[in-house]
Amino acid sequence: NIKQLKLFWALVDLVVDATDKTKTDVKKSLATDLKYIDIWVDMQGNTHVEPQSISPEKMTQAVFNDFFKSATQVIAGWLETSPNAIRERHAEMMAEKRYEGMRRG
């Protein structure tokens, strides 16, 4: 669901705005904390950890729902707030974007 994926990246923006981390760093950290990763060993025996894709083509809706719910809780912990406060802030952000879109239109 593209709408939910955009919602996820908006939540990542909350973390970016509150920290010195990039979107990529935040997404990788979330994937690692939630154990949504691939671990592989290269030919030299080095172990690598990579975040799995969260694209709609790679993740079922049910799996994304669980990932998103868990990500909201992790983000709330990072920002020392509640998951409800995260959802409320996101709603405010979306309202601001709608307002900006109306002003441009």
Image (cartoon, rainbow, N blue to C red):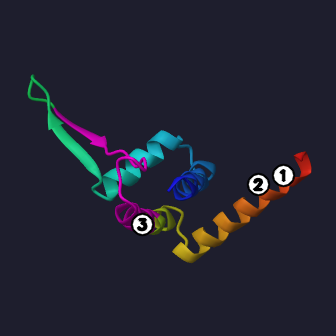
Q: Is residue 80 above or below residue 32?
A: below
Q: Residue at x 71, y 60 (%)?
A: 93
Please give the residue where the numbered disc 2 appears in the rendered image: 97
Please give the residue where the numbered disc 3 appears in the rendered image: 65
Sequence-wise first label, 2 or 3: 3
Residue 57 magenta: yes
Please give the residue where the numbered disc 1 appears in the rendered image: 100
Q: Is residue 82 visible?
A: no
Under mark 2, the amino acid is Lys
Q: Is residue 25 above or below residue 59?
A: above
Under mark 1, the amino acid is Glu
Q: CA distance from mark 2 to mark 1?
A: 5 Å
SS class, disc 1: helix
SS class, disc 2: helix
- Residue 29 placement, left or right of 35: right
Q: Is residue 105 visible?
A: yes
Q: Is residue 72 above or below residue 31?
A: below
Determine the image quadrant of residue 53: top left
Residue 3 in picture, x, y percent from top left: 57, 56
Q: Nearer the viewer, residue 8 or 83?
A: 8
